[in-house]
Image (spheres, grey):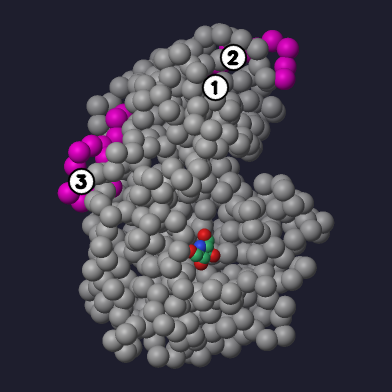
Amino acid sequence: MSADHTPAIAVERASAAGELPDRHRPRFHFTAPSGWLNDPTGLTQREGVYHLFYQHNPYGAFHDRIHWGHATSRDLMTWTDEPIALAPSPGPDEDGCWSGVFVDDHGVPTLVYSGHREGRRQVGCVATGTADMHTWTKDQANPVVEAPPGVDVTEFRDHCVWREDGVWRQVIGAGIRDVGGAALLFESPDLRSWRYLGQLSVGDVTGRSGLGGPPGSTDWTGAVWECPDLFHLDSHGTGAPGTGDNEGTDVLLFCAWQDDAYHPLCLTGTYRGDRFEPTGLHRFDLGERAFYAPQSFRDESGRRIVFGWIMEERAQEASLAAGWSGAMSVPRVMSLTDGCPTFTPAIEVDARRRDAVEIVPHGSDVTLQPGAGLAGPVGDQLDLEIDLVIPTGGTAHLVLLASPDRVEQTVLEIRRVGVETATVRLDRSRASLDPGAWTVERRGEIPVDAEGTVSVRALLDHSVLELFLNGQPLTVRAYPTNPEALQTAVEVPAYAAGRPGALAVTVGRFAAWRMEGAARAGDLRG
Ligand code: DQQ
């Protein structure tokens, strides 16, 4: 790489983490030191050290001239900022170094990413790193892969690269005009010369084929697939696509996108030959776009770990004024339950728990009659574990970030609609008096067992709410204006939504912890 491709490592940062007077900024979720953060990229663990690269504009809290920020951690929670890994420079990435992956090319740390130039389709680029992963050199051969001729490709970006039978393979996200999103498959002996093999998988922009719903639905497969990620998952572990035995499934994760409509989805099925044969389509997070552009990796202990970009859901002016935008999710471990993806916060998250409170200890059930409630801890930096038993037809409310007068509150309604199904509805209509804060409702379905057990894990980190409901995540943002909007509760409405009468709900456990902050090493103000 010539010297003029060397990124400006010593970027002037507007301010250090936590120094901005924005109480909506999360503390135990990673945010950029300042400026803009979006997709996680290049996730890997090497010799015990986790590497989190991320899409980053260090100059302001808006998406522009995207760099690759870089942070490292030994525990997935406490991050150390490293020099910026990639910055736009004259050439194929002169307007942005967009998302990609890390691969170990026979000992050489290598990034495969999308180069962006305004007004053009993105192209595939490669950069190699020093052993300490601090200095990255863009390959003279860039771009190394472009949209295949003969396919009417509207968009072309984002990479998943793996080794198979002695060669490299990758899928790149794309859109095919009037058809839908696609994962295009390529092969290479050296990560530099790529041969197009065809369409690994294609969506349906109309939603009429049965693959996903129509435009506007929560499982619409979109016009473009961003951030494809292909891997195997079974009860023994996880690995590269095509590995593992007949048990388990291959997973093709992607983000369905078109202009202002986007959400992450995943296909389960079989990667065989050069095709992905789907057997199921699943929502990846019931909060839709709030958790976007997820990327996964297999860590050294064999876990499939997923991070996603938690985007802002308030007016952009507020982010610009605050000087930061975007948070990384907590690490989520992905598993299979009855053939469906399920998620739980990585055990490392638990290490941040302090000051345990058992509101309802194990084994001492509390029955809440209609109209009754159980107050939880006060705070907006909390971890809650709540086990509910909801009878068929019953409804429970989880109240979060509520002001003492209840003028502001965010309410999750859990309603058991059938023996094995519950619906969840996140009501933000009163989450904030700030007119710029989003109020759009989020809805989904979660499985329940025959007893009607709903296990809730709720991570509250100021404006970030990551909820896990029987293993189904629901991520959302809330920005109450009242600094006293800190109350939590479990309540049973006097009348179940849409039904005459209401039923009692049993709280089998309600435990809570204050969460220690410090997503960044040295920032120990809790
Ligand atoms: N963000 C990146 C793209 C990707 C999109 C640009 C998803 O590579 O398609 O920052 O958020």
Indicate which disc, 1 or 3, sits on the residue closer to the N terminus: 1
Query: Can you see residue 16?
Result: yes
Please provide percent x and percent y for residue 12. 25, 62
Please provide percent x and percent y for residue 214. 77, 51
Range of magenta residues? 498-526
Nearest the viewer among 245 and 157 is 157
Nearest the viewer among 196 and 367 is 196
Amino acid marked by disc 3: Asp
Question: Which residue is identified by label 3?
Answer: 523
Circle 2 Cα neighbour tier, 10 Å, few/some/many (<14 / 14–19 / ≥20): many
Query: Does the stretch in magenta take in 514?
Result: yes
* Residue displayed at 36% across by 30% down: 380
* Residue displayed at 69% across by 27% down: 417
Nearest the viewer among 35 and 71 is 35
Amino acid marked by disc 1: His
Residue with the most extreme right position: 208
Q: Which-is-in-front pick, marks 1 and 3?
A: 3
Amino acid marked by disc 2: Pro
Q: Which mark is residue 505?
A: none
Query: Can you see residue 231?
Result: no
Q: Are marks 1 and 2 in contact (CB under 8 Å)?
A: yes
Question: Which residue is identified by label 1?
Answer: 397
User: Spatial distance from mark 3 to mark 2, Cα to Cα?
Assistant: 41 Å
Indicate which disc, 3 or 2, sits on the residue closer to the N terminus: 2
**Dominant SS in magenta:** loop
Question: Which residue is identified by label 2?
Answer: 493
User: Spatial distance from mark 1 to mark 3, Cα to Cα?
Assistant: 35 Å
* Residue displayed at 42% across by 39% down: 464
Circle 3 Cα neighbour tier, 10 Å, few/some/many (<14 / 14–19 / ≥20): some
Q: Secondary structure at mark 1?
A: strand
Asked if residue 189 lies left or right of residue 138, the reply is right
